[in-house]
Image: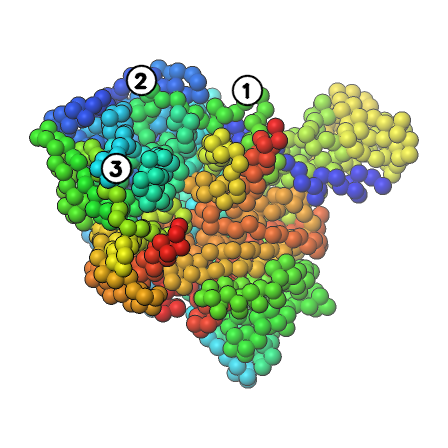
Amino acid sequence: MDQAMRPQMMGARVSRVEDPRLLSGQARYLDDVDVPGMLEVAFVRSPHAAAEIVAMRLDKARQHPGVFAVMTYDDCPVMLWDRAEYDIGQPCLAHGEVTYVGQAVVAIIAENRYVAEDAAELVEIEYRPRTPVLDMREAILERPRRVHAETSNVFFHEEYATEGFSEAFDRAPHRLSATFRTNRQTAVSLEARGTAAMIDAASGRLTVYASTQSPHRMREDISNLLDIPEQLVRVIVPEVGGGFGMKANCYPEDIVVAKAALAYRKPVKWVSDRTESLLSDVHGRDDIHDVEVAFADDGKIIAIRDHLMADGGAYPAYPFSGAVGETSLAARVLTGPYDIAHLATVIDCTYSNKVPLGAYRGVWGPIASFIQEGLVERVARYLSLDPAQVRRRNMIRPDQFPYRNAAGMPYDEGSYLASLEDALKLIDYDGFRRRQQELRTQGRYLGLGISAFVEPTAMASSEAGSVGYESCTIRIEPSGRVTAALGLGPTGQGHETTMAQILADQLGVRFEDIVVLHGDTDSAPYGGGTGGSRSGPIGGGAALVAGRQMRQRLIKYAAHLLEAGEDDIELGHGEAWVAGVPDRSISIRTIAQTAYTDVKKIPPGLPIGLELTERYLPKRPVSFSNGTHIAEVEVDIQTGIVRVTRYVVVNDCGRLINPTIVEGQIHGGVAQGIGATLFEALHYDRDGQLTTTSLMDYLLPESTDVPRMVIKHIETPSSGEGGIKGMGEGSLIASPAAVANAISDALAPFGAMVDTLPVTPAMIRAMVS
Amino acid sequence: MPTEEARTAIELNVNGITHRLDVSPRWSLADVLRHQLGLTGTHVGCEQGVCGACTVWLDGLPVRSCLMFGVQAQGHQVTTVEGITPSTGLSPLQTAFQEHHALQCGFCTPGMLLTAQALLDRNPKAEEGEIRAALSGNLCRCTGYQFIVDAVLAARDAGRDA
Amino acid sequence: MKPAAFEYIQAASVEEAIQALADHPQAKILAGGQSLVPLMNFRLNRPGMLVDVNNIDDLATIAVKDAGLAIGSLVRHQRLVEDALIGDRLPILAQAASHIGHWAIRNRGTIGGSLAHADPAAELVALMIALNGTLVVRSHRGVRRLTADEFFLGYFTTALEPTEIIVQCEIPAPTGRMGFSEVVRRPGDFALAGAIVAQSGAAGWVTWFGLGSRPERFSVSHWGQDDGERHAMLGELATRMMLAEDEEYKRDIAVNAAMRAYRQIKEGK
């Protein structure tokens, strides 16, 4: 049995190779990129939600000591979405009008950020304010006006219904309706966005350092939008301090910084501060769903009807509109892990005078889970059934595979019912119900919320880019050490570790002898970057395919040099040997030296050297993970404060590459879900001013807000390479529904049911009063 | 055209080394450390004292380096993540962070380490609740905190055994 | 988010500090900076000069005065939490200070700075009003002593003149037993609503903070025989607070916070 058949590194709890540099303060993030003479940018941003720009006076800013240049649209006349997927595009600097508070209008380029901000205050802009469009339902009716005069406020509309929907819906014994809503939220990566650009004097190439999840797409965008030949652009992604989907976009500031470096032939850097981050990073969520559910006496759900609305902000974010993602994906997975025969959806995505809506981890998922799990909860309460029992009654059964849901999505086999049963055991469901009853008599309100979820991952199209494949280059150096490179854009997921785990097993070399490169378009093969939970299944798949190819080549070498049959060669620990005859062995190092320096000994038909690139395109367009979360909360009805007290997760993402890293992803997603349910909301006032522009107003969960979690893994392999499924988003997809349902459960004596996220103390007080 | 902003000559003791430098009074201690001394392990996440990424020690106590001006640190001992890192390898707390997967993107990590180390220095028997309370001023967006708390508990126990 | 330029001087003594304030109308005192510097970083506050008082050791004293304590304005929050004399004489102060922000903020923030900032949700502002403390302020024109009621005028507004510096806070020892409770969304946050209560015999007072334009203290003539009576009594008192529409929901929370603070007394915590 050879090494690849009994993997040692894949599935192991390996410590991350990334950590020492991060722990010692030696890692280099975007703002740590510093070269002599580097200039810094501050943007003058719109103070109005909607206004015509009447006049700009820039002289004072230009003359301010330390200012190098002041740029307006005329200096950088570039529109995002120039390729006309939508009717309108976003100018990188406002052109004649502003359409949201925070929109970049003028760029100040100065000797440092302090001076740039001084000069920004000297820019005088005369605005003629317009009535802002702020309400989604009104916007659909083109009220109070069109955001963009030339086109409808509804920029995406789609309708779908299963055959026989109306009949099934109308005939059902029971029907309920509800409106679900998630407020605007945003990623708040702890490292904000940033870009630095400079021209290499020798080659004339433009080097752009970008804090992005999508290095190759960023290079394409800069090349296309600024009309620079692609080979003359290099994108380098330094350490990235979190992205969560938000850093998948190409932003106006990225283009302006690159343009400034080109125009002024100076190194230029812009680093977003936190207020800019909240004002200009893509926002996420912002959904309203008018939902109706039809069901039978036993709790079997027959049909769901949903009018899905999302506020896309002033422009479709480039190159991925979060509003379209939020709605069109939600419509396809609205039935979750339940076998619901009928579905009818109508989607409207609207423009408004708010920040463009983009991706935030789990795009579509939190709202879809909130609805699907909220409906189950409502059905159970209406029929006085146990919510766990209603879930069992509706869950997709193992004998139904291959399974397509009512929207036609092909599910992977999973542990739909098993994960629910395991989670109920882990939380001691029956014991909880007894405790809940006891404590209610003492005026304490505990609740338990179940959230069974599906997580479509590794889709052919995600916010990270349109490519559905990933690439892996492997180069075994003459010393036998391995340099690998992938087109991923990690933001803390530990790909240098997980991809090396996969490669070590395939190549039979020591894990420590592999380095994994990424994020430099000069060294990484073209790829789709990181987003949409694709890096594990597709990136890992590419590593497997490339590793297997290289393994075959090593085996051919060993067989040739050891004069044995290829079938008899085994690889491991940096050696190749003849099965059963360990003395007949050769080191990978010797093979590598042969491949590069002793070319006469290369086996016939093999190329010189040990280098190859392979691409992996999964056969299925999507891979489904699944699982169940259960949250326990205590609601203080006197104050409206909610504490999450216990939390269990049963997760099935197929074959695990590194269980510890998977658990870290789950912990983080649940914490974000607690934030989404209890704290995080971007609030606009009646004038369209964003009032949550600091971390004193936009509240993130702290160490005291997140409970200890218990995680159990189930591994139902996918049909793709390695059996790996994606898992980066499921924990944030499932957790808001779990916490929201737990609050509804706690407040059941008051007849309360949560329908809006986040749930604030004021809302809780209103529910119990 | 260069600026004519006045600068003040100061002596700044960072990680045991005294630096002589000219600072603009309005430059935060974080910016002075990062952009004048090249100590980029201190990160800036919010510039209003909320996120804790910029936490350093001032005379051994954690403070926000975004809410102090560099000029104010004269006469004090400043310690950054670089200063609590041994010349080779990692400290016991840093090692515990790696072993327990207490970091993902790493941006909050230096501030977490400085807060946690200061806590353990003062309270070598800190319980989970005390650890969570001490770390509550350091935001992490990636880990959900559990593995960070585990790492601090493990470092505490290792210190007890030593 | 970088502050506008300013001149900077370090004052070695209170005299130097008040002279600087007298000489420079644009000058502002820089103590712990935990409220001022964020505002400067947002450019919501742009003093032309900062007079750094962090090196004036005379302002960092804690002493017994009459039946209470005299606390220098530069005493930092964490010291209020940990100081033995405060723990002995005025534990309610240590309790209140322990709720301020997070550890790193408490290590730097000062009592004088917190009081000068006058956030209506600030624990120390509430405590000064609750215990009717006195603020000793100095300028080149001399010393003024202001009661908390005289000093705190409203939302982020005080009677402190631009040329004045807070040098000391005198806090009388409370009569009766006290309780403290605040309701926060996350530990360390400013309170949605909080209450400090005192009970002496049947009577006492309640001070609410975190709602309205500044903390307010109300006399309690009778704490009531049971929770029901007490709740009704506090509910009636709470109706006297003027609240903005979006704060209306806090009124009940404030009453419940006061109930909890009172329970602390009864439970002997």
- The picture places residue C50, in percent across and down from the top left corner, at 22, 29
**As drawn, which residue projects farthest toward the left?**
C141
Would you name the residue on which mark 3 appears?
Answer: C69
Q: For label 3, count other residues whose C-alpha is less than 10 Å away and answer few (under 14), some (14-19) or many (20+).
A: many
Mark 3 vs mark 2, foreground winner is: 3
Would you name the residue on which mark 2 appears?
Answer: B10
**Cα–Cα span, label 3 and label 2:** 37 Å
Identified at 60% across, 79% down, the residue is A298
- The picture places residue A216, in percent across and down from the top left corner, at 53, 40
Q: Looking at the picture, do discs 3 and 2 lie on one chain?
A: no
**B34 vs B83, nearest the viewer:** B83
Q: Which chain carries label 3?
A: C
Q: Quadrant of residue A275?
A: top left
**Cα–Cα span, label 2 and label 1:** 27 Å
Q: For label 1, count other residues whose C-alpha is less than 10 Å away and answer few (under 14), some (14-19) or many (20+).
A: few
Q: Mark 3: which amino acid?
A: Leu
Q: Are marks 2 and 1 in contact (CB under 8 Å)?
A: no
Q: Is residue A121 found left or right of B31 in the rendered image?
A: left
Q: Is residue C198 in sight in this rendering?
A: yes
**Cα–Cα span, label 1 and label 3:** 48 Å
Q: Which colour scheme is used?
A: rainbow
Q: Mark 1: which amino acid?
A: Ser
Q: Which of marks 2 and 1 is nearer the N terminus?
A: 2
Mark 1 vs mark 3, foreground winner is: 3
Q: Is residue A751 found left or right of A651 in the rendered image?
A: left
Would you name the residue on which mark 1 appears?
Answer: B87
- The picture places residue A130, in percent across and down from the top left corner, at 23, 56
Classify A15 as above or below B40: below
